[in-house]
Image (cartoon, coloured by chain):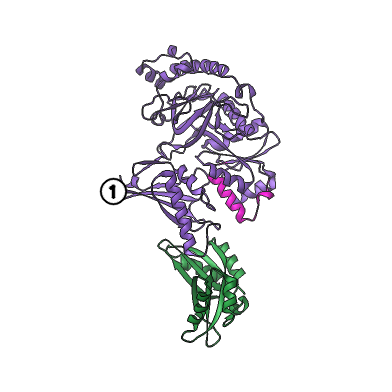
Amino acid sequence: MGNFYNKAMECATLYEMESLQSFRLSQTVRRVYEKVPFYRDRMIANGVSPDDIKSVNDLHKLPFVMKQDLRDTYPYGLFAAPLDEVVRLHASSGTTGKQIVVGYTRNDLGIWDECAARALTAAGGDKTDFMHVSYGYGLFTGGLGIHGGAERIGMTVIPVSTGNTARQINIIKDFGSTLICCTPSYAMFIAETMRDMGITKNDIKLKAGLFGAEPWTQEMRHTLEEMLGLKAYDIYGLTEIIGPGVAFECEEQTGMHICEDHFIPEIIDPDTGEVLPLGEQGELVFTCITKEAFPLLRYRTRDIAVLSRDKCSCGRTLIKMLKPKGRTDDMLIIRGVNVFPSQIETALLSVAGSQPFYHIEVDRVNNNDTLEIQVEVSEAMFSDTIKSMEDVEAAIRRAVESVIGISAKITMCEPKTLKRFEGKASHVTDKRKLLD
Amino acid sequence: MLIKQLSVFVENKKGRLSAITDILRQGGIDIRALSVADTKDFGILRLIVNDVQKAYAALKAGDCLVSLTDVIAVSIEDKPGGLADAMDLLSDAGISVEYMYAFISKSAGAASVILRVDDNQKAIDVLSSKFKILTQAEIAV
Protein backbone atom coordinates (compact mmCIF):
# COMPACT_ATOMS: atom_id res chain seq x y z
CA MET A 1 0.00 0.00 0.00
CA GLY A 2 1.34 3.38 -0.95
CA ASN A 3 0.96 6.72 0.76
CA PHE A 4 -2.14 8.83 1.02
CA TYR A 5 -2.38 12.59 1.00
CA ASN A 6 -5.60 12.67 3.02
CA LYS A 7 -6.23 9.20 4.40
CA ALA A 8 -9.44 10.10 6.24
CA MET A 9 -11.12 11.12 3.00
CA GLU A 10 -9.43 8.72 0.62
CA CYS A 11 -10.20 5.68 2.81
CA ALA A 12 -13.54 6.68 4.34
CA THR A 13 -16.30 4.11 4.69
CA LEU A 14 -19.22 4.36 2.28
CA TYR A 15 -21.46 5.49 5.13
CA GLU A 16 -19.05 8.25 6.11
CA MET A 17 -18.66 9.36 2.52
CA GLU A 18 -22.36 9.44 1.72
CA SER A 19 -23.17 11.30 4.93
CA LEU A 20 -20.59 13.94 4.09
CA GLN A 21 -21.74 14.16 0.46
CA SER A 22 -25.38 14.53 1.52
CA PHE A 23 -24.55 17.34 3.91
CA ARG A 24 -22.37 19.19 1.42
CA LEU A 25 -24.82 18.67 -1.44
CA SER A 26 -27.83 20.06 0.39
CA GLN A 27 -25.83 23.11 1.49
CA THR A 28 -24.49 23.76 -2.01
CA VAL A 29 -27.90 23.41 -3.63
CA ARG A 30 -29.39 25.86 -1.17
CA ARG A 31 -26.57 28.32 -1.76
CA VAL A 32 -26.68 28.30 -5.57
CA TYR A 33 -30.48 28.50 -5.47
CA GLU A 34 -30.15 31.73 -3.51
CA LYS A 35 -27.19 33.21 -5.38
CA VAL A 36 -27.54 32.14 -9.04
CA PRO A 37 -30.71 33.04 -10.95
CA PHE A 38 -29.90 30.39 -13.57
CA TYR A 39 -30.17 27.56 -11.02
CA ARG A 40 -33.19 29.05 -9.29
CA ASP A 41 -35.09 29.42 -12.59
CA ARG A 42 -34.14 25.92 -13.72
CA MET A 43 -35.14 24.32 -10.44
CA ILE A 44 -38.45 26.15 -10.34
CA ALA A 45 -39.12 25.13 -13.94
CA ASN A 46 -38.45 21.51 -12.93
CA GLY A 47 -40.54 21.76 -9.78
CA VAL A 48 -37.61 21.13 -7.42
CA SER A 49 -36.87 23.18 -4.32
CA PRO A 50 -33.73 23.09 -2.15
CA ASP A 51 -35.81 21.32 0.52
CA ASP A 52 -36.18 18.34 -1.83
CA ILE A 53 -32.43 17.75 -1.85
CA LYS A 54 -31.60 16.20 1.50
CA SER A 55 -29.19 13.43 0.50
CA VAL A 56 -27.19 12.01 -2.40
CA ASN A 57 -30.23 9.88 -3.19
CA ASP A 58 -32.08 13.06 -4.17
CA LEU A 59 -29.43 14.13 -6.67
CA HIS A 60 -31.35 12.75 -9.66
CA LYS A 61 -34.14 15.27 -9.01
CA LEU A 62 -31.91 18.16 -10.11
CA PRO A 63 -31.85 19.28 -13.75
CA PHE A 64 -28.67 18.79 -15.78
CA VAL A 65 -26.29 21.56 -16.75
CA MET A 66 -25.00 21.32 -20.33
CA LYS A 67 -21.94 22.87 -21.93
CA GLN A 68 -24.30 25.13 -23.90
CA ASP A 69 -25.58 26.56 -20.59
CA LEU A 70 -22.03 27.64 -19.80
CA ARG A 71 -21.82 29.44 -23.12
CA ASP A 72 -25.26 31.02 -22.69
CA THR A 73 -24.31 32.46 -19.30
CA TYR A 74 -20.83 33.57 -20.45
CA PRO A 75 -18.87 35.04 -18.80
CA TYR A 76 -20.00 35.19 -15.15
CA GLY A 77 -23.64 34.06 -15.18
CA LEU A 78 -23.00 30.84 -13.23
CA PHE A 79 -20.66 32.29 -10.61
CA ALA A 80 -22.00 31.69 -7.12
CA ALA A 81 -19.51 33.88 -5.23
CA PRO A 82 -19.10 37.66 -5.44
CA LEU A 83 -16.48 38.51 -8.05
CA ASP A 84 -14.30 40.25 -5.47
CA GLU A 85 -13.91 36.86 -3.75
CA VAL A 86 -12.70 35.31 -7.00
CA VAL A 87 -8.91 35.13 -7.05
CA ARG A 88 -8.32 33.28 -10.33
CA LEU A 89 -9.98 32.71 -13.69
CA HIS A 90 -9.31 29.89 -16.14
CA ALA A 91 -10.89 29.25 -19.52
CA SER A 92 -11.31 26.28 -21.80
CA SER A 93 -9.80 26.49 -25.24
CA GLY A 94 -13.14 26.64 -26.96
CA THR A 95 -12.07 24.40 -29.82
CA THR A 96 -15.62 23.15 -30.21
CA GLY A 97 -17.31 26.53 -29.85
CA LYS A 98 -17.22 29.71 -27.80
CA GLN A 99 -14.81 29.51 -24.89
CA ILE A 100 -16.10 29.11 -21.36
CA VAL A 101 -14.71 30.80 -18.27
CA VAL A 102 -14.51 29.46 -14.71
CA GLY A 103 -13.52 31.14 -11.44
CA TYR A 104 -11.95 30.10 -8.15
CA THR A 105 -12.08 31.59 -4.67
CA ARG A 106 -9.10 31.13 -2.40
CA ASN A 107 -10.85 28.12 -0.85
CA ASP A 108 -11.51 26.67 -4.29
CA LEU A 109 -7.80 26.86 -5.10
CA GLY A 110 -7.14 25.05 -1.80
CA ILE A 111 -9.51 22.23 -2.82
CA TRP A 112 -7.82 22.01 -6.20
CA ASP A 113 -4.33 21.89 -4.69
CA GLU A 114 -5.46 19.08 -2.42
CA CYS A 115 -7.00 17.04 -5.25
CA ALA A 116 -3.84 17.43 -7.35
CA ALA A 117 -1.73 16.57 -4.28
CA ARG A 118 -3.72 13.35 -3.80
CA ALA A 119 -3.04 12.43 -7.44
CA LEU A 120 0.69 13.13 -7.13
CA THR A 121 0.91 11.15 -3.89
CA ALA A 122 -0.92 8.20 -5.46
CA ALA A 123 1.67 8.23 -8.25
CA GLY A 124 4.37 7.73 -5.62
CA GLY A 125 5.35 11.38 -5.24
CA ASP A 126 6.50 13.10 -2.06
CA LYS A 127 8.39 16.23 -1.02
CA THR A 128 11.72 14.84 -2.21
CA ASP A 129 10.51 14.80 -5.83
CA PHE A 130 11.35 17.17 -8.67
CA MET A 131 8.07 17.86 -10.45
CA HIS A 132 8.52 18.70 -14.13
CA VAL A 133 5.32 20.43 -15.27
CA SER A 134 5.06 20.27 -19.08
CA TYR A 135 1.38 21.05 -19.16
CA GLY A 136 0.71 24.50 -20.57
CA TYR A 137 0.54 27.36 -18.08
CA GLY A 138 -2.06 30.01 -18.64
CA LEU A 139 -5.79 29.85 -19.07
CA PHE A 140 -5.53 26.06 -19.52
CA THR A 141 -5.92 24.43 -16.10
CA GLY A 142 -3.23 21.77 -16.60
CA GLY A 143 -0.06 23.66 -15.70
CA LEU A 144 -1.18 25.68 -12.69
CA GLY A 145 -3.34 22.81 -11.39
CA ILE A 146 -0.51 20.32 -11.03
CA HIS A 147 1.81 23.12 -9.97
CA GLY A 148 -0.42 23.91 -6.98
CA GLY A 149 -0.65 20.27 -5.90
CA ALA A 150 3.09 19.76 -6.15
CA GLU A 151 3.85 22.91 -4.14
CA ARG A 152 1.32 21.83 -1.52
CA ILE A 153 3.24 18.59 -1.04
CA GLY A 154 6.51 20.53 -0.95
CA MET A 155 8.01 19.11 -4.10
CA THR A 156 10.58 21.03 -6.09
CA VAL A 157 8.43 22.34 -8.92
CA ILE A 158 9.94 22.98 -12.35
CA PRO A 159 7.34 25.07 -14.22
CA VAL A 160 8.57 24.40 -17.77
CA SER A 161 5.19 24.62 -19.55
CA THR A 162 4.99 23.34 -23.13
CA GLY A 163 7.32 23.85 -26.05
CA ASN A 164 11.02 23.75 -26.89
CA THR A 165 11.23 20.01 -26.49
CA ALA A 166 15.02 19.72 -26.70
CA ARG A 167 15.34 22.21 -23.85
CA GLN A 168 12.75 20.27 -21.84
CA ILE A 169 14.87 17.16 -22.21
CA ASN A 170 18.03 18.94 -21.10
CA ILE A 171 16.15 20.19 -18.05
CA ILE A 172 14.84 16.70 -17.26
CA LYS A 173 18.41 15.44 -17.47
CA ASP A 174 20.28 18.30 -15.77
CA PHE A 175 17.76 19.28 -13.07
CA GLY A 176 17.03 15.64 -12.25
CA SER A 177 13.25 15.70 -12.81
CA THR A 178 11.68 12.65 -11.12
CA LEU A 179 8.02 13.24 -11.99
CA ILE A 180 6.57 14.67 -15.17
CA CYS A 181 3.10 15.69 -16.24
CA CYS A 182 1.86 16.53 -19.73
CA THR A 183 -0.52 15.16 -22.33
CA PRO A 184 0.32 11.58 -23.36
CA SER A 185 0.90 12.74 -26.93
CA TYR A 186 3.43 15.32 -25.78
CA ALA A 187 5.13 12.65 -23.64
CA MET A 188 5.45 10.58 -26.80
CA PHE A 189 6.99 13.52 -28.62
CA ILE A 190 9.45 14.03 -25.75
CA ALA A 191 10.37 10.33 -25.88
CA GLU A 192 10.89 10.49 -29.62
CA THR A 193 13.01 13.65 -29.41
CA MET A 194 15.06 12.10 -26.59
CA ARG A 195 15.86 9.16 -28.82
CA ASP A 196 16.93 11.50 -31.63
CA MET A 197 19.20 13.35 -29.19
CA GLY A 198 20.82 10.07 -28.20
CA ILE A 199 19.58 10.32 -24.60
CA THR A 200 18.32 7.05 -23.14
CA LYS A 201 15.99 6.38 -20.23
CA ASN A 202 19.07 5.46 -18.20
CA ASP A 203 20.37 9.03 -18.53
CA ILE A 204 17.31 10.50 -16.78
CA LYS A 205 15.68 10.06 -13.38
CA LEU A 206 11.98 10.12 -14.23
CA LYS A 207 10.16 7.51 -12.14
CA ALA A 208 6.54 8.40 -12.79
CA GLY A 209 4.49 10.43 -15.22
CA LEU A 210 0.97 11.79 -14.86
CA PHE A 211 -0.56 11.99 -18.29
CA GLY A 212 -3.98 13.42 -18.95
CA ALA A 213 -6.19 15.98 -20.70
CA GLU A 214 -6.95 13.53 -23.52
CA PRO A 215 -8.01 9.89 -23.75
CA TRP A 216 -5.17 7.38 -24.18
CA THR A 217 -4.85 3.63 -24.29
CA GLN A 218 -3.12 0.85 -22.35
CA GLU A 219 -0.91 0.28 -25.39
CA MET A 220 0.20 3.92 -25.27
CA ARG A 221 0.91 3.45 -21.56
CA HIS A 222 3.23 0.53 -22.27
CA THR A 223 5.00 2.45 -25.03
CA LEU A 224 5.59 5.47 -22.79
CA GLU A 225 6.71 3.34 -19.85
CA GLU A 226 9.18 1.52 -22.04
CA MET A 227 10.57 4.60 -23.79
CA LEU A 228 10.84 6.89 -20.76
CA GLY A 229 11.59 4.27 -18.10
CA LEU A 230 8.79 5.39 -15.80
CA LYS A 231 5.43 4.27 -14.48
CA ALA A 232 2.66 6.07 -16.36
CA TYR A 233 -0.43 7.19 -14.44
CA ASP A 234 -3.64 8.53 -15.86
CA ILE A 235 -5.07 11.70 -14.37
CA TYR A 236 -8.48 13.13 -15.15
CA GLY A 237 -9.99 16.52 -14.84
CA LEU A 238 -11.91 19.13 -16.67
CA THR A 239 -11.89 22.90 -16.48
CA GLU A 240 -15.62 23.09 -15.81
CA ILE A 241 -15.30 20.98 -12.66
CA ILE A 242 -11.89 22.18 -11.37
CA GLY A 243 -9.02 21.01 -13.60
CA PRO A 244 -6.60 18.06 -13.24
CA GLY A 245 -7.15 16.04 -10.07
CA VAL A 246 -10.89 15.34 -10.30
CA ALA A 247 -9.81 11.70 -10.56
CA PHE A 248 -6.46 9.93 -10.55
CA GLU A 249 -4.88 6.51 -10.77
CA CYS A 250 -3.27 4.64 -7.89
CA GLU A 251 -0.60 1.96 -8.23
CA GLU A 252 -3.22 -0.67 -9.08
CA GLN A 253 -4.06 1.20 -12.32
CA THR A 254 -7.50 -0.31 -12.79
CA GLY A 255 -9.40 2.93 -12.98
CA MET A 256 -9.17 6.40 -11.50
CA HIS A 257 -10.29 7.26 -7.97
CA ILE A 258 -12.64 10.23 -8.00
CA CYS A 259 -12.30 12.88 -5.27
CA GLU A 260 -15.95 12.23 -4.50
CA ASP A 261 -15.88 14.19 -1.27
CA HIS A 262 -15.75 17.21 -3.62
CA PHE A 263 -17.30 15.96 -6.86
CA ILE A 264 -20.15 13.44 -6.87
CA PRO A 265 -20.14 11.34 -10.04
CA GLU A 266 -23.11 9.74 -11.77
CA ILE A 267 -23.38 7.70 -14.96
CA ILE A 268 -26.40 8.41 -17.13
CA ASP A 269 -27.85 7.16 -20.36
CA PRO A 270 -26.85 9.98 -22.73
CA ASP A 271 -30.07 9.63 -24.70
CA THR A 272 -32.66 9.46 -21.91
CA GLY A 273 -30.80 11.14 -19.03
CA GLU A 274 -31.71 8.19 -16.79
CA VAL A 275 -29.20 7.34 -14.03
CA LEU A 276 -27.50 3.99 -14.67
CA PRO A 277 -26.38 1.52 -11.97
CA LEU A 278 -22.71 1.02 -11.04
CA GLY A 279 -20.83 -0.96 -13.64
CA GLU A 280 -22.82 0.28 -16.61
CA GLN A 281 -21.27 2.41 -19.29
CA GLY A 282 -22.69 5.83 -19.98
CA GLU A 283 -22.06 9.55 -19.82
CA LEU A 284 -20.25 10.85 -16.77
CA VAL A 285 -21.98 13.60 -14.80
CA PHE A 286 -20.40 15.59 -11.94
CA THR A 287 -21.83 17.68 -9.14
CA CYS A 288 -19.46 19.99 -7.24
CA ILE A 289 -20.34 20.04 -3.55
CA THR A 290 -17.56 22.14 -2.02
CA LYS A 291 -16.62 24.79 -4.55
CA GLU A 292 -17.67 28.38 -3.91
CA ALA A 293 -17.16 30.32 -7.15
CA PHE A 294 -18.19 27.84 -9.82
CA PRO A 295 -20.07 24.88 -8.33
CA LEU A 296 -21.67 23.08 -11.29
CA LEU A 297 -24.61 20.82 -10.43
CA ARG A 298 -25.12 17.68 -12.51
CA TYR A 299 -22.79 18.80 -15.27
CA ARG A 300 -22.81 16.52 -18.30
CA THR A 301 -19.17 15.95 -19.25
CA ARG A 302 -19.84 14.07 -22.53
CA ASP A 303 -17.13 11.63 -21.38
CA ILE A 304 -18.12 7.99 -21.64
CA ALA A 305 -17.08 5.97 -18.57
CA VAL A 306 -18.03 3.27 -16.07
CA LEU A 307 -18.10 3.66 -12.26
CA SER A 308 -16.98 0.96 -9.85
CA ARG A 309 -16.89 0.50 -6.08
CA ASP A 310 -14.85 -2.70 -6.25
CA LYS A 311 -12.33 -2.96 -3.43
CA CYS A 312 -9.00 -1.49 -4.49
CA SER A 313 -5.70 -2.99 -3.36
CA CYS A 314 -4.30 0.50 -2.71
CA GLY A 315 -6.63 0.86 0.26
CA ARG A 316 -8.56 3.83 -1.13
CA THR A 317 -12.33 3.57 -0.96
CA LEU A 318 -12.94 6.50 -3.32
CA ILE A 319 -15.18 5.38 -6.17
CA LYS A 320 -13.36 4.60 -9.40
CA MET A 321 -14.08 5.59 -12.97
CA LEU A 322 -12.78 3.34 -15.68
CA LYS A 323 -10.71 5.09 -18.28
CA PRO A 324 -12.98 7.08 -20.50
CA LYS A 325 -13.04 5.63 -24.00
CA GLY A 326 -13.50 9.08 -25.36
CA ARG A 327 -15.96 11.88 -25.43
CA THR A 328 -19.39 11.56 -26.92
CA ASP A 329 -18.43 14.46 -29.16
CA ASP A 330 -15.17 12.73 -30.25
CA MET A 331 -17.16 9.71 -31.33
CA LEU A 332 -17.30 9.20 -35.07
CA ILE A 333 -20.22 7.52 -36.74
CA ILE A 334 -18.80 5.82 -39.81
CA ARG A 335 -21.14 3.81 -42.00
CA GLY A 336 -23.52 3.73 -39.05
CA VAL A 337 -20.93 2.28 -36.66
CA ASN A 338 -19.77 4.16 -33.55
CA VAL A 339 -16.00 4.53 -33.58
CA PHE A 340 -13.79 6.16 -30.96
CA PRO A 341 -10.33 7.35 -32.03
CA SER A 342 -8.93 5.57 -28.95
CA GLN A 343 -10.11 2.22 -30.36
CA ILE A 344 -8.09 2.85 -33.48
CA GLU A 345 -5.05 3.72 -31.34
CA THR A 346 -5.46 0.46 -29.43
CA ALA A 347 -5.61 -1.52 -32.66
CA LEU A 348 -2.68 0.28 -34.18
CA LEU A 349 -0.40 -0.18 -31.19
CA SER A 350 -1.19 -3.89 -31.05
CA VAL A 351 0.84 -4.30 -34.25
CA ALA A 352 4.51 -4.96 -33.58
CA GLY A 353 6.80 -2.00 -34.08
CA SER A 354 4.04 0.57 -34.46
CA GLN A 355 4.12 3.95 -32.79
CA PRO A 356 1.29 6.21 -31.68
CA PHE A 357 1.80 8.66 -34.52
CA TYR A 358 -1.31 8.48 -36.65
CA HIS A 359 -4.05 10.54 -38.16
CA ILE A 360 -7.61 9.55 -38.92
CA GLU A 361 -9.38 11.00 -41.92
CA VAL A 362 -13.08 10.47 -42.50
CA ASP A 363 -14.71 11.55 -45.73
CA ARG A 364 -17.77 10.86 -47.81
CA VAL A 365 -17.30 9.73 -51.39
CA ASN A 366 -20.37 8.94 -53.53
CA ASN A 367 -22.51 8.91 -50.38
CA ASN A 368 -20.25 6.34 -48.74
CA ASP A 369 -18.24 7.08 -45.63
CA THR A 370 -14.55 6.42 -46.06
CA LEU A 371 -12.05 5.90 -43.29
CA GLU A 372 -8.35 6.42 -43.88
CA ILE A 373 -5.75 5.92 -41.21
CA GLN A 374 -2.37 7.47 -41.85
CA VAL A 375 0.36 5.72 -39.93
CA GLU A 376 4.00 6.64 -39.67
CA VAL A 377 6.25 3.74 -40.55
CA SER A 378 8.78 3.04 -37.79
CA GLU A 379 12.26 1.64 -38.25
CA ALA A 380 11.07 -1.65 -36.75
CA MET A 381 8.31 -1.92 -39.34
CA PHE A 382 10.41 -0.98 -42.34
CA SER A 383 12.03 -3.45 -44.67
CA ASP A 384 13.51 -3.28 -48.16
CA THR A 385 10.94 -5.50 -49.86
CA ILE A 386 7.47 -4.44 -50.99
CA LYS A 387 6.01 -7.73 -49.89
CA SER A 388 6.96 -7.35 -46.24
CA MET A 389 5.74 -3.74 -46.24
CA GLU A 390 2.42 -4.90 -47.63
CA ASP A 391 2.30 -7.53 -44.89
CA VAL A 392 2.69 -4.79 -42.28
CA GLU A 393 -0.04 -2.75 -43.92
CA ALA A 394 -2.34 -5.78 -43.98
CA ALA A 395 -1.61 -6.54 -40.32
CA ILE A 396 -2.60 -2.99 -39.33
CA ARG A 397 -5.71 -3.17 -41.49
CA ARG A 398 -6.78 -6.47 -39.92
CA ALA A 399 -6.12 -5.20 -36.39
CA VAL A 400 -8.20 -2.06 -37.00
CA GLU A 401 -11.03 -3.99 -38.62
CA SER A 402 -11.17 -6.51 -35.81
CA VAL A 403 -11.51 -3.74 -33.20
CA ILE A 404 -13.93 -1.34 -34.90
CA GLY A 405 -15.72 -3.75 -37.21
CA ILE A 406 -15.44 -1.70 -40.37
CA SER A 407 -12.79 -1.58 -43.06
CA ALA A 408 -10.21 1.16 -43.30
CA LYS A 409 -7.61 2.24 -45.79
CA ILE A 410 -4.17 2.27 -44.23
CA THR A 411 -1.72 4.79 -45.64
CA MET A 412 1.87 4.43 -44.60
CA CYS A 413 3.71 7.72 -44.11
CA GLU A 414 7.33 8.73 -43.65
CA PRO A 415 8.57 9.41 -40.11
CA LYS A 416 7.85 12.82 -38.59
CA THR A 417 5.45 13.84 -41.32
CA LEU A 418 2.31 13.69 -39.18
CA LYS A 419 1.65 16.54 -36.78
CA ARG A 420 3.07 16.42 -33.25
CA PHE A 421 1.22 17.92 -30.32
CA GLU A 422 2.43 19.86 -27.30
CA GLY A 423 -1.02 20.11 -25.74
CA LYS A 424 -4.12 18.12 -26.49
CA ALA A 425 -3.74 15.93 -29.54
CA SER A 426 -6.19 16.13 -32.39
CA HIS A 427 -6.08 12.85 -34.29
CA VAL A 428 -9.13 13.25 -36.50
CA THR A 429 -10.07 15.21 -39.61
CA ASP A 430 -13.71 14.70 -40.45
CA LYS A 431 -14.11 16.11 -43.94
CA ARG A 432 -17.81 15.23 -43.93
CA LYS A 433 -18.38 18.19 -41.63
CA LEU A 434 -17.21 20.52 -44.38
CA LEU A 435 -19.76 19.03 -46.75
CA ASP A 436 -22.77 19.44 -44.49
CA MET B 1 31.37 -10.71 -49.64
CA LEU B 2 28.12 -8.92 -49.19
CA ILE B 3 27.71 -5.23 -49.80
CA LYS B 4 25.42 -2.74 -48.12
CA GLN B 5 22.46 -1.28 -49.91
CA LEU B 6 20.58 1.72 -48.52
CA SER B 7 16.83 1.17 -48.54
CA VAL B 8 14.73 4.31 -48.12
CA PHE B 9 10.99 4.49 -47.54
CA VAL B 10 9.41 7.06 -49.87
CA GLU B 11 5.84 8.25 -49.69
CA ASN B 12 4.16 8.76 -53.06
CA LYS B 13 4.14 12.51 -52.75
CA LYS B 14 5.35 15.23 -55.02
CA GLY B 15 8.92 16.26 -54.37
CA ARG B 16 9.97 13.37 -52.16
CA LEU B 17 12.55 11.86 -54.54
CA SER B 18 13.93 15.30 -55.19
CA ALA B 19 14.23 15.96 -51.44
CA ILE B 20 16.04 12.67 -50.84
CA THR B 21 18.44 13.05 -53.75
CA ASP B 22 19.12 16.59 -52.57
CA ILE B 23 20.23 15.22 -49.20
CA LEU B 24 22.70 12.99 -51.04
CA ARG B 25 23.90 15.91 -53.14
CA GLN B 26 24.47 18.05 -50.03
CA GLY B 27 26.38 15.17 -48.49
CA GLY B 28 28.60 14.81 -51.55
CA ILE B 29 27.46 11.22 -52.06
CA ASP B 30 28.08 9.49 -55.36
CA ILE B 31 25.31 7.10 -56.39
CA ARG B 32 26.60 3.95 -58.09
CA ALA B 33 23.26 2.31 -58.77
CA LEU B 34 19.65 2.67 -57.80
CA SER B 35 16.22 1.23 -58.30
CA VAL B 36 12.76 2.20 -57.10
CA ALA B 37 10.08 -0.31 -56.23
CA ASP B 38 6.70 1.31 -56.03
CA THR B 39 3.13 0.64 -55.05
CA LYS B 40 0.16 2.98 -55.30
CA ASP B 41 0.95 4.69 -51.99
CA PHE B 42 4.63 4.32 -51.32
CA GLY B 43 7.91 3.24 -52.80
CA ILE B 44 11.22 1.88 -51.65
CA LEU B 45 14.31 3.55 -53.03
CA ARG B 46 17.31 1.23 -53.12
CA LEU B 47 20.72 2.78 -53.44
CA ILE B 48 24.29 1.63 -53.85
CA VAL B 49 26.64 4.50 -53.01
CA ASN B 50 30.34 5.20 -52.72
CA ASP B 51 30.24 5.98 -48.98
CA VAL B 52 27.59 3.97 -47.14
CA GLN B 53 28.18 5.32 -43.63
CA LYS B 54 28.16 8.94 -44.73
CA ALA B 55 25.04 8.50 -46.85
CA TYR B 56 23.26 6.61 -44.05
CA ALA B 57 24.07 9.37 -41.54
CA ALA B 58 23.00 12.13 -43.93
CA LEU B 59 19.65 10.46 -44.69
CA LYS B 60 19.03 9.80 -41.00
CA ALA B 61 19.78 13.40 -40.16
CA GLY B 62 17.29 14.38 -42.87
CA ASP B 63 14.59 12.37 -41.05
CA CYS B 64 14.44 9.72 -43.77
CA LEU B 65 13.40 6.19 -42.88
CA VAL B 66 16.48 4.32 -44.05
CA SER B 67 17.85 0.87 -43.40
CA LEU B 68 20.88 -1.10 -44.53
CA THR B 69 20.31 -4.29 -46.48
CA ASP B 70 22.87 -6.97 -47.33
CA VAL B 71 22.96 -7.61 -51.06
CA ILE B 72 25.29 -9.34 -53.50
CA ALA B 73 27.04 -7.42 -56.26
CA VAL B 74 28.19 -9.65 -59.06
CA SER B 75 30.21 -8.70 -62.11
CA ILE B 76 28.91 -10.18 -65.33
CA GLU B 77 30.44 -10.08 -68.78
CA ASP B 78 28.55 -7.56 -70.93
CA LYS B 79 27.37 -9.93 -73.66
CA PRO B 80 24.10 -11.65 -74.60
CA GLY B 81 23.27 -14.42 -72.17
CA GLY B 82 25.60 -13.17 -69.42
CA LEU B 83 22.83 -12.54 -66.94
CA ALA B 84 20.94 -15.67 -67.94
CA ASP B 85 23.95 -17.80 -66.98
CA ALA B 86 23.94 -16.29 -63.52
CA MET B 87 20.20 -16.80 -63.15
CA ASP B 88 20.56 -20.44 -64.15
CA LEU B 89 23.01 -21.02 -61.35
CA LEU B 90 20.68 -19.51 -58.78
CA SER B 91 17.63 -21.28 -60.09
CA ASP B 92 19.38 -24.67 -60.17
CA ALA B 93 20.43 -24.16 -56.55
CA GLY B 94 16.83 -23.36 -55.56
CA ILE B 95 17.60 -19.76 -54.59
CA SER B 96 14.83 -17.18 -54.93
CA VAL B 97 15.59 -13.66 -56.10
CA GLU B 98 13.57 -11.04 -54.23
CA TYR B 99 14.67 -8.30 -56.60
CA MET B 100 17.64 -7.25 -58.69
CA TYR B 101 18.92 -4.37 -60.76
CA ALA B 102 21.88 -3.86 -63.02
CA PHE B 103 24.27 -1.13 -64.04
CA ILE B 104 27.15 -0.83 -66.45
CA SER B 105 30.36 -0.75 -64.53
CA LYS B 106 33.25 1.55 -65.20
CA SER B 107 35.57 -1.27 -66.18
CA ALA B 108 35.04 -1.91 -69.87
CA GLY B 109 33.03 -4.92 -70.98
CA ALA B 110 31.43 -5.71 -67.67
CA ALA B 111 28.02 -5.10 -66.11
CA SER B 112 27.27 -5.28 -62.42
CA VAL B 113 24.14 -6.82 -61.01
CA ILE B 114 22.82 -6.21 -57.51
CA LEU B 115 20.97 -9.23 -56.16
CA ARG B 116 18.75 -9.54 -53.13
CA VAL B 117 18.17 -13.27 -52.56
CA ASP B 118 16.71 -15.43 -49.82
CA ASP B 119 20.00 -17.18 -49.04
CA ASN B 120 23.05 -14.96 -49.41
CA GLN B 121 25.73 -17.48 -48.50
CA LYS B 122 24.44 -20.17 -50.81
CA ALA B 123 24.09 -17.64 -53.64
CA ILE B 124 27.67 -16.46 -53.22
CA ASP B 125 28.90 -20.07 -53.19
CA VAL B 126 27.22 -20.99 -56.46
CA LEU B 127 27.87 -17.69 -58.25
CA SER B 128 31.55 -17.48 -57.36
CA SER B 129 32.25 -20.66 -59.35
CA LYS B 130 31.74 -18.66 -62.56
CA PHE B 131 31.49 -14.99 -61.65
CA LYS B 132 33.38 -12.35 -59.79
CA ILE B 133 31.64 -11.19 -56.62
CA LEU B 134 32.36 -7.53 -56.00
CA THR B 135 33.36 -6.07 -52.65
CA GLN B 136 32.14 -2.80 -51.14
CA ALA B 137 35.52 -1.26 -51.94
CA GLU B 138 35.32 -2.29 -55.57
CA ILE B 139 31.85 -0.80 -55.88
CA ALA B 140 32.95 2.41 -54.22
CA VAL B 141 35.59 3.24 -56.80
Which color was chain B given?
green
Residue B61 location (% of width, % of height): 58, 62
Q: Which residues are magenta?
A: A182-204
Residue at 56% across, 35% down = A235
Q: Residues within 10 Å of mark 1 (few under 14, many from 20)?
A: few
Q: Is residue B33 above or below residue A57?
A: below
- Give the quadrant of the C terminus of chain A: top left
Q: Specify whether residue B4 is in view.
A: no
Residue A255 location (% of width, % of height): 54, 33
Foreground of the two, A179 or A144: A179
Magenta highlight: main SS: helix
Amino acid type at image mark 1: Asn
How many numbered circles are shown? 1
Residue at 31% across, 49% down = A368
For label 1, the residue is A367
Kind of element beneath mark 1: loop
> Along the horizontal axis of the image, is A63 left or right of B4?
left
As drawn, the chain in purple is A
Foreground of the two, A90 or A305: A305
> Along the horizontal axis of the image, is A170 left or right of A101?
right
Residue A341 location (% of width, % of height): 44, 43
